[in-house]
Image (cartoon, rainbow, N blue to C red):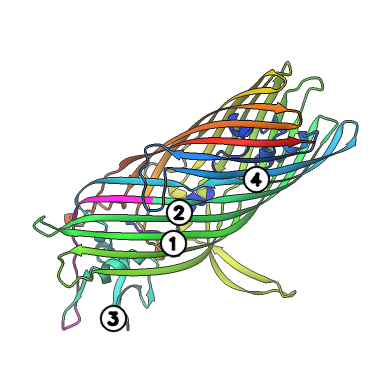
Amino acid sequence: MSLNGIAQETYENAKIATEDLNGTARYVGMGGALDALGADISTISTNPAGIGLFRHSSANVSFGMVNQQDAQKFANGNATNMSFDQVGFVYSMRTNRHSFLNVAFNYKKSRNFDYILSASDRLNGASQNKLSYLKPNLGVYGLSKGNDGTWYGTNGNYQSNAFTQLDYLYLNGLGMVQQDKDGRISLYYNDANAYMFNRANSGYIGEYDFNISGNINDRIYLGMTVGINDVHYRGYSEYTESLVDQTNKNIGDVTIADERKITGTGFNIKAGVIIRPLEYSPFRIGLSIATPTWYDLTTSNYTTLVNKTNIEGAANSGYVQESYDFKLYTPWKFGLSLGTIVNNCLAIGAGYEYADYSTLDSRINTDDGYDWYGDYYQNSESDKAMNAHTQNTLKGVSAFRVGMELIPDKNLSVRLGYNYVSPMYNESGIKDGSISSPGSFYASATDYTNWKATNRITCGVGYNVGNLSLDLAYQYAVQSGDFYPFCSYSGDSTPEHNNVCDAVKVDNKRHQLLLTLGYHF
């Protein structure tokens, strides 16, 4: 059985677990292919050993502009936004003739949530509210009436985790539940013939990295980074269906307006090594590993149903709001990189990174208290039901990076890069609201998108004037996906239970201009 309607679950968590290509203009201009070449502060979060190649102290600050191609303004979302992307420094100390010990700090915007998604299509014998009709009829949960007169989804004597906030709004606000004088319950639903959807996301994940690194005789470079992540996500969406009655006559529209926020913090540890295997060759091999980011997060929503139909007895509007604390552990990451320098004027780098997102661990907070020393702690356990869904929906992701930097003049650099990230989502992935999980219970939207591969093309230039450096980069990123307003249900022995919607192709095409100012001392 596969229905829909999940809030903080696989698809929402995937937004938090992924990263953009961002950092200094040099790093972005070379497609992020600097993990073996090093000597750029952005490698602090990808291969910490890259900081060990610095021979002088330096400081950098980066900012720029991000534009979403073909996007139309919606709510507070704009197609073009300014962005503060990075600031950091490296302090380099010589320990002997051929060895250095370096310490560094860097902040970067690892994830930029600014995005506007718009989709619309026809519906034939399907609707979002029909999901709330099907669940009790298919045995996902039962119904009971509370002391306050509202209907709830139950599992025995307990409220069902598969009863979402949208189920609550439809069954109560739209009045889909009826009870006769003898207490018998009956349900009804309305099909829709079309829908329109718009969402504007905003916010970011800030990553604060602290690093210690060094080298042994200019042959082996070692580094370790401790990172702290700060999550600020906000999304506002409006989903409108044009409903029809049993004779297929239009009876008006119903809109679900949903505002969701996700905030919290996390931390991780990253380690790396760069080896120069041949004493008189600049060729380098890099290896890196990153622990999961252990997040403590809070998701909250304010969701409204606006009824503009002529359904008798239905309310004009209704609302629900909830807040939920949970933990999320992202997957381990592993990296391999190569790099070399030709004639002191051409740097070439390549890298590969792998992370298995099917192991994304959604966790439920259990009990909490104070330990022997009076320190606060909070326990958690894996949400086994939701994690099983994640294993079937997400998969391992491979990221490939190649880049080059040409130095035609001692003060001038020209850069090119390419970055490819394989798809995270299985094509058959769905948002399954029949899961007995808090992720389902706190649902307030049913849409989801199975995004495909990401391709990024980058270029840039750099110019040095004494101890000052000025770097400019451009990045074009493109990704397409299949959007669904809700997941389909079909194959039931009762034909009218079929509730099928088709995918709509959506794109995320982004242009980024990035400027980095640096000072070496």
Q: Nearer the viewer, mark 2 or mark 4?
A: 2
Q: Nearer the viewer, mark 3 or mark 1?
A: 3
Three-letter residue code for mark 1: Gly
Magenta span contains residue 390: no
Q: Nearer the viewer, mark 4 or mark 3?
A: 3
Give me the C-alpha separation between circle 2 and circle 3: 32 Å
**Relative to the observer, which residue lies in front, 75 or 145?**
75
Q: Earlier in the sequence, mark 2 or mark 3?
A: 2
Q: Are marks 4 and 3 in contact (CB under 8 Å)?
A: no
User: Which residue does the numbered mark 3 point to in the structure image?
Assistant: 149
Q: What residue sits right under mark 4 in the picture?
A: 290
- The secondary element bearing badge 3 is classed as loop
Q: Nearer the viewer, residue 52 or 286?
A: 52
Amino acid type of the residue tagged 4 in the rendering: Ala
Q: Which residue is mark 1?
A: 439
Marks 3 and 1 sit apart, C-alpha to C-alpha, by 25 Å
Front residue of 424 and 461:
461
Residue 449 at what x, y percent from top left? 38, 46
Marks 4 and 3, the one that precedes in the sequence: 3
Q: Amino acid at mark 3?
A: Gly
Badge 1 density bin: few <14, some 14–19, many ≥20, Cα 10 Å: many
Across and down, in percent, residue 43 comes to 67, 38
Label of residue 486 in the image: none
> What range of the chain is rendered magenta?
181-199
Magenta stretch encompasses residue 191: yes
Residue 83 in picture, x, y percent from top left: 54, 44
Residue identifier under label 2: 12
Q: Helix or strand or loop: what does disc 1 sit on?
A: helix
- Specify the quadrant that holds the N terminus: bottom left
Q: Residue visible at 36% across and 66% down? A: 165
Badge 3: residue crowd in 10 Å (few <14, some 14–19, many ≥20): few
